[in-house]
Amino acid sequence: METVNQTYILEFSLQGFFEDPGVQPLLFGLFLFMYLVTLTGNLLIILAIISDSHLHTPMYFFLSNLSFADICFTSTTVPKMLLNIQTERKNITFENCLSQMYFYILFFQLDNSLLTVMAYDRFAAICHPLHYMVIMNSRVCALLLLASWLLSVLVSLLQCLMVLRLSFCTELEIPHFFCELNQVLQLACSDTFLNDLVTYIASGLVGFIPVTGIIFSYSKIISSILRISAAEGKCKAFSTCGSHLSVVTLFYGTGLGVYLSSTASQNSRTNAIASVMYMVVIPMLNPFIYSLRNKDMKLAFRKLRSFLYIKGLLSQV
């Protein structure tokens, strides 16, 4: 089969979900709605945390960064997909495909790292409440955030550099709505053994270690909560980590579901639909999960609304 060196590759073709033109307007409206909700919800969380001094704590510091990561994570794929649907063009240049892949992996790994750090924060708050502010001081929080960013950058950079060594076939159709790493590797005509090896090792390390850390943290948290004699104390302790545990369950549950579906099914269209869960739906749900049952966040939203109204940015309802 004829091959083309990556230097001369012009474009990939993103096939998306369905080729039926009648479905495209529905998909455009649905994904535009979810994207706008994701942007609005996560931006409101960031603004509420910044504007309320009572939320300047480690937990909300990491939550604001998680919201920022969710915005960026969704923005790496959804706008391009909406543009393709609207213009009825499926092409993406090799450079843009590589850039999309880089930022997708980066912010996915950043989400992964931040969820792990937030689990450690809840462990310190519940299991060591008297030493919490010493354990999670501002310097430690900054170092944990920096480490999360550095790890994410290194993982995504490594994966993309490995793609640059490949040559590709002339048929460059990706049965997905974005440049997903495994789908791109399947189009390569050169040997991908080294790429696959690096992918498995990196996925194992950045997947196994965070999951192990989260499981360890919550095993200690549950053990500490069960030792609390007062029922009110147990409820308060559970409420402080319930939202995070819900997000962790959704994130890793859907991620595992996508992995299992791709293993069990050769239908790439099914895998693309499954990917929507952790790429679009979860970032959209996170603001609701963290705010609906959180009294501090509700109060911060009221203060933010009052502030915006006073500044003349909102009209009175």
Image (cartoon, grey):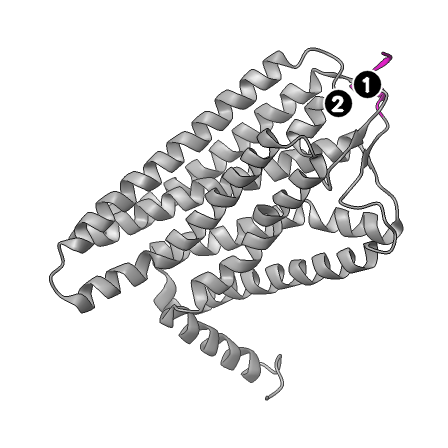
Q: Residues within 10 Å of mark 1 (few under 14, many from 20)?
A: some
Task: Give whichever of 181, 259 is nearer the camera.
Answer: 259
Task: Give left or right: position of 138 versus 29.
Answer: left
Q: Is residue 179 visible?
A: no
Distance from label 2 to label 1 (Cα)?
A: 6 Å
Q: Quadrant of the N terminus?
A: top right
Which callout, 2 or 1, points at the residue further toward the start of the chain?
1
Q: Is residue 71 visible?
A: yes
Q: Which residue sits furthest front?
A: 264
Residue 259 in percent (x, y) is at: 55, 34
Residue topped by disc 1: 169
Residue 230 in percent (x, y) is at: 13, 66
Residue 21 in percent (x, y) is at: 88, 52
| Residue occupying the point 61% across, 17% down | 195
Task: Give whichever of 177, 164 is nearer the camera.
Answer: 177
Q: Point out the stretch of residues depicted in magenta.
A: 1-9
As helix, strand or loop, the secondary structure at mark 1 comes to strand
For the residues labelled 2 and 1, say whether their Cβ atoms are less than 8 Å apart: yes
Q: Amino acid at mark 2?
A: Leu
Vertical side of 256 occupied by 202: above or below: above
Task: Give whichever of 180, 136 is nearer the camera.
Answer: 180
As helix, strand or loop, the secondary structure at mark 2 comes to loop
| The quarter of the displayed image where residue 281 is located | bottom right
Which label number is shown at residue 187? 2
